[in-house]
Amino acid sequence: MDWASLPADLLFSISSHLREPEDFVRFRAVCPQWRAAVSHEEHAFFQPWIMASRWHEDEYSENFVFYSLSTLKTIKVCVPDMKGKRVAASGSGHLVAIDNDDDLSAVLVNPLSGKTMALPRLPEFFHDNGAHGWVTGEGVITVVLYNWMSENMALWYRGGGITMKGWAVVPRWKLRLRMSYYLRMLAVYGDQMEMHLTDLGGDNEDSVVLLQETEKVELLGGCWPGSDELFKATTLYHHEWFSLYRNVEQEEIPVHDIGNAMVVQSRDSCTRTYMIPASRDFAALSSRNAFYYLWKQFDAGGSYNALFKKCLASEELTFVKRLPEDWKLSDEWFMPSLKY
């Protein structure tokens, strides 16, 4: 068999079952023909990783540590451009990092490829107040940043020929009501978005009631498939409180069936909780219509972290696996990608 002569469509089909970046890179390294048949951005959805905490002495390090549930390996990644920077947001295979010495200076980083892009200087309301948020999108990238001291949020967009040179500033309390609208406006107007915004619904009694309802939910940081649908979830402090909602014309509809998809839940933040396609190729994450989360457990020997699964329809809870003893306390998921 001349392996180099395999048809391109067959090679693409094989690559679509590779769920780890390492396997995909090795696949493309077999020979020039295989490399030409599948570009580095044409990989399938990789299995989510778990990202280690970067608190205290590691917070401004250039080193990142991830854990793969399929290979049972710890992956260490060095990104020199991250030295002296704090991670403020993550999602869609990217990180947003803020400079320790200049808290209005931010970069967008793909830790797998090592590619870094300087973002526009942050608005002044982030100075001395911190920044948090998420990154979403595939093919296009949207960055959402906020802090607890300001009533506003900042949005940045790149894609479809648009790369914003500044940040669009919108009211934070309206974000949950209007996120789909904001994303559409960013895609059309980019830096000119704020000039074209209309105050949908105003501040009438109906919008106030809706706002009170949305205080109990937060936006999911990422959603697959990439569509105009917007999913939200209850604030994530414990799995027993987890509920999922679909946002339809400013109405939140409870969701008990997400079809051939699943949710990986980061307890500290919905913005790092993702809806992704379920796959039999995912080790330990193979069930559809379910959500997976990490939780600290205690036994006679001390404590450990474990992975659990909860079915959205039946609410049945299942213990999946125990994480390595030396794994740092963290329940944050990371979506690896070679795309940029």
Image: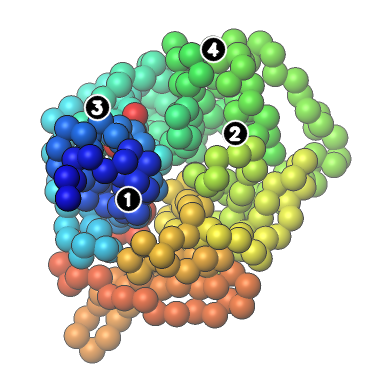
Asked if the residues shown at circle 3 and circle 2 are in contact, with their CB atoms under 8 angstroms apart, the answer is no
Q: Which mark sits nearer the N-terminus, 4 or 2?
A: 2
* Above/below status of 321 relative to 55: below
* Circle 2: residue type: Arg
Q: Between marks 4 and 3, how big is the CA–CA gap? A: 24 Å
**Secondary structure beneath label 2:** helix
Q: Which part of the image, by quadrant, shows the C terminus?
A: top left
Residue occupying the far right of the picture: 205
Which residue, given by chain and number where applicable, does mark 3 sit on?
A: 115
**Which residue is pictured at 39% across the width and 79% down the height?**
319
- Image mark for residue 14: 1
Which residue, given by chain and number where applicable, does mark 4 sit on?
A: 191
In the image, which is nearer the foreground, mark 1 or mark 2? 1
**In the picture, residue 228 is in which quadrant?**
top right
Q: Between marks 1 and 4, how big is the CA–CA gap? A: 41 Å
* Mark 4 surroundings: few (<14), some (14-19) or many (≥20) residues within 10 A: many
**Secondary structure beneath label 4:** helix
Q: Between marks 3 and 2, how big is the CA–CA gap? A: 30 Å
Q: Which mark sits nearer the N-terminus, 1 or 3?
A: 1
Which residue, given by chain and number where applicable, does mark 2 sit on?
A: 172
How far across and how far down the image is residue 138, in percent? 45, 34
* Mark 2 surroundings: few (<14), some (14-19) or many (≥20) residues within 10 A: some
How far across and how far down the image is residue 156, in percent? 48, 23
Asked if the residues shown at circle 4 and circle 2 are in contact, with their CB atoms under 8 angstroms apart, the answer is no
* Above/below status of 265 relative to 248: below
Name the foreground residue: 47 vs 147: 47
**Which residue is pictured at 55% across the width and 15% down the height?**
190
